Amino acid sequence: MNVHKPVGPTSTQVTAQVRRVFSLLGGSKIAAGHLGTLDPAASGVLPIALGKATRLIPLIEDRRKVYVCTLVLGRSTTTGDALGENVRETPIPPDAPGLFESVLPRFLGAIEQIPPMFSAVHYAGKRLYDFARDGITVDRKPRTAIIHEVRLLDANDEKSILRLRVACGEGTYIRTLCEDIGAAMGVAAHMGSLVREASGPFVLAKSATLEDVGARPLETLLGPESAISLPTVTLDARGSVDFCAGRAVCAGSPNSFGHVFVHDAVRGLIGIGESHGSRIAPRKVLV
């Protein structure tokens, strides 16, 4: 599912709400998991896998993200976003957009980021945000993030708020990027609003709201083929039975090596197999 997470709830709470809808629909509790946490104050694309589709999450190769955020200049906060308390204030540079463009090349490609304390990174068996809520700061190791593009969309009249579009790899901290860009500009800064416009193949324009999920749950479901790009193999009735029983089957004509979608004789998806020439070994049986 491609869910449009609203501002307010956590990603886990949204996933739980979706799980409840489909558990009631099916009469039993089902598994559910999301692909990439969005902070409560952020909105946008939150892909959610349901049922046995949760086993397919590792096969989604496209993990690129696209965000639109505001870079607020002149004030840094304890959390790196608009929810934190003031830490430092500085004057706004006279030509903030031009200064931003001048430092931007430093933040393209592979960069090092220190995870913010208010993040879901594990440390000593706890999440960093658990320490942060207790007023504790711990040492964090830098992590490599990939920034594909940062584009200045517009600025407010005072040039104190710059609206940016960021295309990046998985695991990028946008609030840290905003703070670091501000530091390079010589000004205190934090992230204002944040909207995730895309997560891999899932885009905001085609996302479903929680109201859509509640009113028309089945219409919001997407087939795994919409998110995962693999060749397809169709088996006959006997081959389908053997595959679902965990036995390797012959697919007839030779196929390329690697993972494939496996369909039964009526073109229904029954699982993921690993192709070894003309033989298909079951890897994830879905029925």
Image: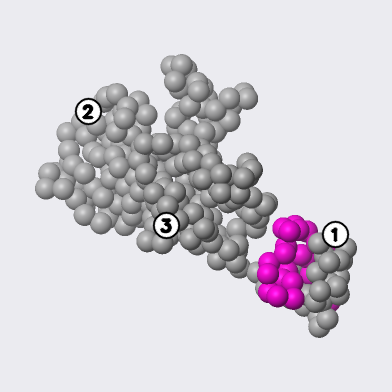
- Image: 122 above or below 272: above
Q: Is residue 263 magenta?
A: yes
Which amino acid type corresponds to the residue marked 1 in the rendered image? Gly
User: Which residue is found at the position 74% from the left and 72% from the top?
Assistant: 264
- Image: 77 above or below 45: above
Q: What residue sits right under mark 1 in the picture?
A: 246
Which amino acid type corresponds to the residue marked 2 in the rendered image? Glu
Q: How is the image coloured?
A: one colour
Judged by depth in the image, the label closer to the viewer, 2 or 3, is: 3
The picture places residue 220, in percent across and down from the top left corner, at: 48, 58
Whether residue 83 is visible: yes
Which of the 4 image quarters holds residue 251?
A: bottom right
Q: Which element is circle 1 on?
A: loop
Answer yes or no: do the residues labelled 1 and 3 have beta carbons within 8 Å?
no
In the picture, the disc for residue 207 is: 3
Q: Mark 2 or mark 1: which comes first in sequence?
A: 2
In the picture, the disc for residue 89 is: 2
Identify the magenta region: 262-287
* Residue furthest bottom as drawn: 253
Q: Is residue 76 left or right of residue 96?
A: right
Which amino acid type corresponds to the residue marked 3 in the rendered image? Ser
- What quarter of the picture does the C terminus occupy? bottom right
Q: Observer-nearest residue: 154 or 140?
A: 154
